[in-house]
Image (tube, rainbow, N blue to C red):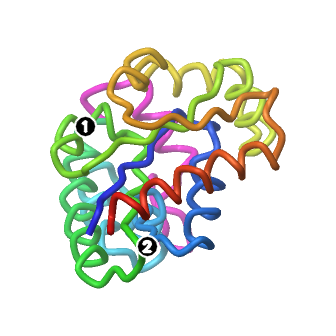
Amino acid sequence: MLKIGLTGGIGSGKSYVAEILGQAGAAIIDTDEIAHALTAPGGVAIAAIEASFGPSFITNEGALDRARMRAHVFGDEAAREQLQAILHPLIGEETRRQAGLAMGHYTVFVVPLLVESGRWLNQVDRVCVVDCDRDTQISRVQARNGLSQAQVEQILNAQVSREKRLSVAHDVILNDGTVSHEFLRQQVLGLHQQWCNLAS
């Protein structure tokens, strides 16, 4: 089955693009959703996170305290690597399990850090980047997550540059502040048709 890696910086609109592709008949595997499930109450990663970082990073409900962990790891590269060492193998295992069951015209892997991880580039047939200017990313993430501009910029600075992301793209979907929902949808469905043709 044709494998598409869908990526983009925070606030670029990856999830919305994936939703349109899913409605059009693609199989969607979202590594962010997998990470959320692993760190929800009763999630497979919770015990290891608590053992490594301590109980203060776990909420009363038994989930990862995402805000606390975000503040901790974005200022500390060693802590970020420690968290990734717990999560990435578990995400990889669940991703492979879902891929084995996937039914669709082709499979889309939604991977926010696809370019950063390095290993994903060899695992997909094409990379599609949802592209967006930095100012639009900042305003979207502030509106969605209630973070300060400084917090959003810290997250953006931990991700690869827009230029580096675009340099590995086979396909690009523009979703900056000038793009209407209808134009975005047209771009996505145009690529969907191309990928269906490639898949067959």
Sequence-first disc among 1 and 2: 2
Q: Quadrant of residue 139?
A: top right
Q: Is residue 49 magenta?
A: no
Give x and y (percent) for residue 38: 38, 69
Question: 194 or 85: which is nearer to us?
Answer: 194
- Amino acid type at mark 1: Ser
* Residue that mark 1 sits on: 117
Write the start and end of the magenta stretch as one range.
Answer: 56-79
- Amino acid type at mark 2: Ala
Q: Is residue 78 magenta?
A: yes
Give x and y (percent) for residue 87: 28, 56
Which residue occupies 29% across, 46% down? 83
Q: In the structure shown, which secondary structural element does the residue marked by tag 2 occupy? A: strand
Which residue occupies 25% across, 37% down? 117
Real-space CA distance between mark 1 and mark 2, rounded to the nearest whole angstrom:
22 Å
Q: Which mark is residue 27?
A: 2
Give x and y (percent) for residue 143: 81, 39
Q: Quadrant of residue 144?
A: top right
Give x and y (percent) for residue 193: 52, 59
Question: 39 or 10: which is nearer to us?
Answer: 10
Q: In the structure shown, which secondary structural element does the residue marked by tag 1 occupy? A: helix
Q: Callout 2 environment at 10 Å: few (<14), some (14 to 19), or many (20+)? A: many
168 up-or-down from 58: above or below: above
Q: Callout 1 environment at 10 Å: few (<14), some (14 to 19), or many (20+)? A: few
**Quadrant the N terminus occupies:** bottom left
